[in-house]
């Protein structure tokens, strides 16, 4: 527990708390500083006491003032799927002055009410009744999507309203954690079963059994760590965390080839993204430059690409040839600017790739993954990494892999178009052509090899082997 949490906890510890507020010490700041924050994010694994802690605080608030509480999840088919039973059991255990109905709970004296709902019903948002809420508690918050947050949060309009999130993180970029964990008006507490003195011995035994069987399951279920990777995510959290820290020890001045790639917006919410990669070693590359702009007409987009080419002088320029990008490619070729048209849906060129990957887009994304694993690619821009976190793959017939179409990812997971990572993918797709060009250039130049020595030094003869010392 850090010093700040200790100091806040001591303020609560210095007074005698009512029994209903007997919570793990790590949650004391939630009570002591209730008026200092609007949002409260409690994350952690099973047996941590976070759910009981929030429920106890809400019941205490209901006893002392008239408030309206809503408890919700992304989807709630029945009342039993909510935190209703937690409230009901606490009320019975402490003999509190509440009346428990089939679908709501009210305080007999203050008339405070606690209601329960799912935010999505039959695929539609349901925010009816949220506008006058004093307290909103979102349980299982790891399942809440960004689109749901974008609808719900603006409906909580009361000046002193409080919003509680309880979650066992699923992925590194869970929408709630990503949006609220670093906000100044959010108290962020991570708590696990070892921080909870009220955790039963039976649960502690289960945690020990789980740890002995599978460290990954233990870290996620009991320590609240996000999964390293879900089954259909292409990149692991470890790979994406490592890439900004990659260091290249080679002499960069011996390299310096560059590739410019541009992903051209096709839909209203998409953006145009251009990326420049630079070679830093024999097979080592880094992100050098990123530029984005809102959807513009063909001439302005063409002009921007020409400007970037003039400034960074790439050896290869590749443009998305699908949709509106085709018009940009045509215009650039019309004015005699060398450009490669990328068609991600086309089959791979060689038989080995065809046996593994459905199309060129999939091959290029898997090349990114390979370069991450080998420590040959440094990407620092957070929006590229954020896009890469969302890339999913699936299997086609005969075990051939395919990157999930962006339209399908949008519909199934409510993910925005990965414009940044698609630009990176297109740049990576042309690295092999850089290597071909280098090899061709070497084969045409006089190359040298030491063949013998005499009294004055080595005798050097020119030749053209496949690989030779060139300087």
Image (spheres, rainbow, N blue to C red):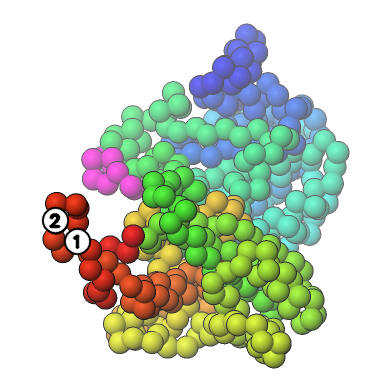
Q: Which residues are magenta?
A: 209-217
Instruction: Classify residue 298 as left or right of residue 343.
Output: right
| Quadrant of res 293 | bottom right
Q: Which mark is residue 64?
A: none
Say which residue appears at 65% left-offset and 13% top-offset: 11
Quarter holding the C terminus is bottom left
**Residue 197 seen in the figure:** yes
Instruction: Classify residue 207 as left or right of residue 405.
Output: left
**Residue 86 seen in the figure:** no
Task: Work out how far the residue at label 1 is from the one at label 2, CA to CA, in angstroms.
Answer: 7 Å
Which residue was labeled with disc 2?
454
Instruction: Classify residue 117 as left or right of residue 160.
Output: left
Q: Which mark is residue 459?
A: 1
The front one of 131 and 249 is 249
Residue 455 is covered by the magenta coloring = no
Residue 210 is covered by the magenta coloring = yes
| Quadrant of res 41 | top right
Q: Earlier in the sequence, mark 1 or mark 2?
A: 2
Q: Is residue 291 above or below residue 210?
A: below
Q: Crowding at label 1, few (<14), some or many (≥20) Cα neighbours within 10 Å?
A: few
Q: Is residue 97 above or below residue 444?
A: above
The front one of 162 and 219 is 219
Disc 2 secondary structure class: strand
Instruction: Classify residue 423 as left or right of residue 171.
Output: right
The picture places residue 373, in percent across and down from the top left corner, at 35, 57
The picture places residue 279, in percent across and down from the top left corner, at 47, 60
The picture places residue 157, in percent across and down from the top left corner, at 84, 46
Is most of the magenta stretch helix, strand or loop? helix
Residue extending farthest to the front is 455
The front one of 347 and 124 is 347
Residues tagged 1 and 2 counted as in contact (Cβ below 8 A): yes
Residue extending farthest to the top is 14
């Amino acid at each position: 527990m850090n010093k700040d949490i200790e100091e806040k906890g001591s303020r609560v510890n210095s007074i005698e708390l009512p029994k209903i507020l007997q919570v793990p010490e790590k949650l004391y700041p939630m009570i002591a500083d209730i008026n200092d924050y609007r949002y409260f994010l409690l994350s952690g694994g099973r047996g941590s006491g976070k759910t009981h802690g929030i429920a106890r605080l809400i019941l205490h608030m209901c006893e002392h003032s008239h408030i309206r509480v809503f408890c919700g999840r992304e989807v709630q088919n029945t009342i039993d799927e909510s935190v209703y039973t937690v409230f009901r059991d606490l009320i019975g255990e402490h003999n509190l002055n509440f009346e428990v109905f089939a679908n709501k709970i009210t305080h007999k004296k203050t008339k405070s009410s606690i209601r329960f709902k799912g935010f999505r019903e039959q695929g539609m948002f349901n925010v009816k009744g949220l506008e006058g809420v004093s307290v909103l508690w979102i349980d299982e918050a790891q399942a809440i999507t960004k689109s749901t947050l974008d609808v719900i949060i603006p409906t909580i309009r009361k000046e002193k309203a409080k919003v509680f999130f309880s979650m066992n993180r699923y992925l590194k970029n869970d929408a709630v954690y990503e949006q609220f964990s670093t906000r100044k008006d959010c108290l962020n507490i991570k708590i696990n079963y070892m921080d909870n003195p009220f955790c039963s011995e039976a649960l502690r035994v289960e945690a020990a059994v789980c740890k002995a069987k599978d460290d990954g399951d233990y870290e996620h279920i009991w320590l609240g760590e996000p999964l390293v990777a879900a089954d259909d995510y292409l990149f692991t959290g470890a790979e994406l965390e490592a890439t900004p820290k990659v260091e290249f020890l080679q002499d960069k001045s011996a390299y310096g080839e560059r590739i410019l790639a541009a992903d051209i917006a096709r839909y209203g919410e998409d953006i145009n993204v251009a990326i420049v990669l630079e070679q830093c070693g024999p097979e080592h590359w880094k992100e050098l430059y990123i530029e984005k702009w809102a959807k513009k007409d063909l001439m302005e987009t063409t002009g921007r690409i020409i400007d970037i080419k003039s400034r960074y002088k790439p050896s290869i320029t590749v443009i998305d040839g699908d949709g509106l990008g085709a018009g940009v490619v045509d215009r650039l070729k019309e004015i005699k600017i060398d450009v490669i048209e990328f068609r991600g849906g086309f089959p791979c060129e060689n038989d080995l790739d065809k046996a593994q990957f459905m199309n060129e887009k999939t091959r290029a994304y898997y090349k990114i993954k390979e370069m991450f694993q080998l420590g040959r690619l440094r990407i620092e821009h957070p929006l590229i990494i954020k896009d890469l976190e969302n890339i999913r793959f699936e299997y086609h017939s005969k075990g051939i892999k395919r990157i999930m179409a962006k339209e399908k990812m949008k519909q199934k997971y409510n993910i925005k178009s990965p414009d940044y990572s698609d630009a990176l993918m297109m740049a990576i797709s042309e690295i092999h052509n850089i290597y071909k060009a280098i090899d061709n250039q070497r084969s045409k130049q006089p190359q040298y090899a030491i063949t013998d020595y005499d009294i004055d030094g080595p005798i050097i003869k020119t030749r053209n082997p496949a690989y030779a010392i060139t300087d």
